[in-house]
Image: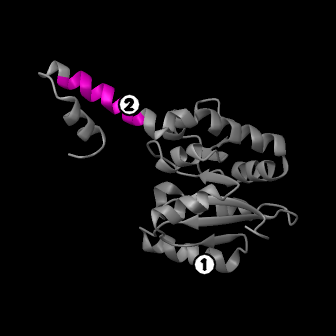
Amino acid sequence: RAGAGFVCCVLAHLRQVKDPLAAASAARRLPPSSRLAIVHARRALEPELGRAAEREMRENPRYRWLGDLPRARALSILAGSDLLVVSSRAEGGANVVSEAIACGRPVLSSRIEGSMGLLGEDHPGYFAAGDTSELAALLERVEYDVAFREELAERSRRLAPRVDPARELESWRALLGELFEKGGGMTELRLTQLVQGGG
């Protein structure tokens, strides 16, 4: 992170529905004083978007596309970033939003149902899908307005219990226990094996 400036993470495959270069386009609108850098990881599922990302790197010094990375490396980048941007035009609840919540990262997201279901309808970091002007204004605000950035981070921290693995396991245990109780019962050992992924 030394000398990296203000790091904005994008973890999205390159395909049209993800609008994967929205953050890079928005970053072009920032003032020269901005130290924001976009770090983007994931595969180019649509080759023309891979070529567009390579071109963006050549033309936009604020943008760096790393291509596909192992999951642990991608999560390490997210955890070390100042901000996550999710720019999808349509999506269910993106896993990366849950990961950002788990590590307390601020999130800016397009206002789509999947993100609203995870972050809440009143999340202050929404922008209209495809609106790079609105995203640029939010990026600038997050970089320079410490109170706003902390508000976004606090939102993630408050939501963290929802994505706690222990809570998820207990929820699965309760659901499976209820289902199998209706279906004739199950031993505690078998229930534990199912919950822990043992088949």
Is 61 situated above or below 117? Answer: below
Left or right placement of residue 80 versus residue 197 in this view: right
* Residue 36 part of the magenta-drawn span: no
* Residue 172 part of the magenta-drawn span: yes
Which of the 4 quarters of the picture holds residue 6?
bottom right
**Residue occupying image coordinates x 48% and y 39%:** 114
- Residue 2, horizontal then vertical, whole percent: 77, 70
Q: Which residue is label 2 attached to? A: 170
**Residue occupying image coordinates x 41% and y 35%:** 168
Q: Which residue is outermost to the top?
A: 182
Report the number of numbered marks.
2
Q: Label 2 sits on what residue type?
A: Glu
Q: Which residues, given as a range, are shown in magenta?
A: 168-180
For the stretch drawn in magenta, the main secondary structure is helix
Earlier in the chain: of badge 2 and badge 1, it is 1
Q: Quadrant of the N terminus?
A: bottom right
Q: Is residue 22 visible?
A: no
**Residue occupying image coordinates x 69% and y 51%:** 135
- Residue 40, horizontal then vertical, whole percent: 59, 65
- Residue 71, horizontal then vertical, whole percent: 46, 62
Q: Which residue is outermost to the bottom?
A: 58
Closer to the camera in the image, 139 or 22: 139
Which of the 4 quarters of the picture holds residue 47?
bottom left
Q: Is residue 16 visible?
A: yes
Closer to the camera in the image, 177 or 109: 177
User: Which element is circle 1 on?
Assistant: helix
> Which colour scheme appears in the figure?
one colour
- Residue 116, horizontal then vertical, whole percent: 55, 35
Q: Label 1 sits on what residue type?
A: Arg
Q: Which residue is label 1 attached to? A: 55
